[in-house]
Image (cartoon, rainbow, N blue to C red):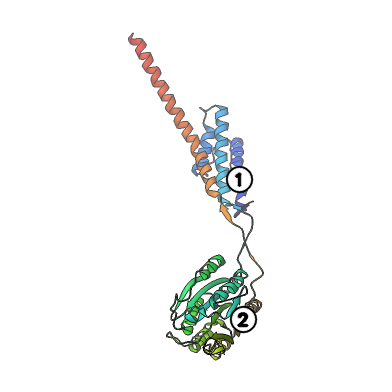
Amino acid sequence: MIEFLFPWVLIASPLPLIIWLFSKAKQPQLAAIRTPLFSNWSHLQNKQSSSSSKLVIQRIITFIGWLCLITATARPQWIDEPIELPTSGRDLLLSIDISGSMEEEDLKLGGRNVNRLLVVKSILSEFIEKREGDRIGLVLFGEKAYLQTPLTFDLKTVQFMLDETEIGLAGASRTAIGDGIGLSIKRLRERPAENRVLILLTDGRNNSGELDPIEAAKLAQHAGIKIYTIGVGADKQTRRSLLFGTQTFNPSAELDEETLKTVAKLTGGQYFRAKSTQQLAQIYEMLDSLEPVEDKPEIYRPVQEMYYWLLLVSLVSLVLPFLIQFLARTLEKISHRAKTISIGERNAN
């Protein structure tokens, strides 16, 4: 639909008609009006050489130009149908451990043992899909940390980049948990202070990088960033060998739960332990309830300006009478010259 930004300007629309009627009754020209538009109007009105029909047409064209000019000044806008935009919810970074220990096949997916990263990808994809309205980003860390996906509303891109993640992209032998937190803080600190959340998942302990996880947590606390930490990996697994038979061992022996608990506590978050695929899925469901998505969508109505089309029509209509007069005079001169030449040729004969 069409709306006017300055509708009160339309009051001036009948002004030329009022001036024309007033000048018709009074006869003398209105000397106070000096604008080119009204000079043209007055010129057209008092031009005695024009026929009555031509004068009416010129007045109509000029009046149309005036109406277009006034309507353009009122700033008409075409308002499209409302569009729902993603709500400005949380800025949520997912920091994922992709060190070599994530290759441990101690979790089940679809009834078979698979490595930890594959399970994390599967559960995280469902979690990300539910976060419509949040900006999601992805930070990966191994021996070093790097940003895989900046904060964005484009959840499909985040899921695609998560699917492309492979163990060893950031170094496979060691784990820089502190650097992963530090890089996440750097990205979240650039965002508005409200609802900044980091979810950090690891299966090991900090043994690489320049930043200690506890010190990183203090920086996050100062920046107002809440950190939820998740320790992933089974705590008991059996293995058979020809020499020693069946042995039971702990595949998560390197998991530093105390540090993860401290990081979460310092920042107002929580620590979760995921010993199975089911527990990991439950943790992300719990995080959905702890950090709910905004449920009030923002409505946006696209606006298209229309005034420039009216200005173009106004310009054409105001110039058109002068153009018609110029063409008429030019044709008249050509016709007069042709007649003069013709008469001269006859007299010569």
Query: Farthest residue toward the top?
Result: 349
Which quarter of the rendered picture does the C terminus lie within?
top left
- Pointers 2 and 1 in contact (CB under 8 A)? no
Residue annotated with mark 1: 13
Crowding near the residue tagged with mark 2, few <14, some 14–19, many ≥20 C-alpha atoms within 10 Å: some
> Which kind of residue does numbered mark 1 sit on?
Ser
Q: Is residue 217 above or below residue 11?
A: below
Please name the residue shown 49% across and 72% down the image: 165
**Left or right of residue 143, residue 277 in this image:** right
Element carrying mark 2: loop
Foreground pick, 336 / 15: 336
Foreground pick, 300 / 112: 112
Q: Decide which of tag 2 and tag 1 comes sooner along the chain.
A: 1
Crowding near the residue tagged with mark 1, few <14, some 14–19, many ≥20 C-alpha atoms within 10 Å: some
> Which kind of residue does numbered mark 2 sit on?
Ser
Q: Visible in this render: residue 190? A: no
Residue 60 falls in image quadrant: top right
Please name the residue shown 36% across and 17% down the image: 341
Residue annotated with mark 2: 276
Query: Farthest residue toward the left?
Result: 348
Residue 162 image offset from top left, x and y in percent: 52, 71
Foreground pick, 192 / 155: 155
Q: Is residue 199 above or below residue 73?
A: below
Identify the mark at residue 84; answer none if there is no mark: none
Element carrying mark 1: loop
Residue 332 image offset from top left, x and y in percent: 44, 24
Foreground pick, 149 / 4: 149
Query: Farthest residue toward the front?
Result: 242
Q: How many marks?
A: 2
Q: Visible in this render: residue 155? A: yes
Residue 97 image offset from top left, x and y in percent: 50, 79
Residue 272 image offset from top left, x and y in percent: 60, 84
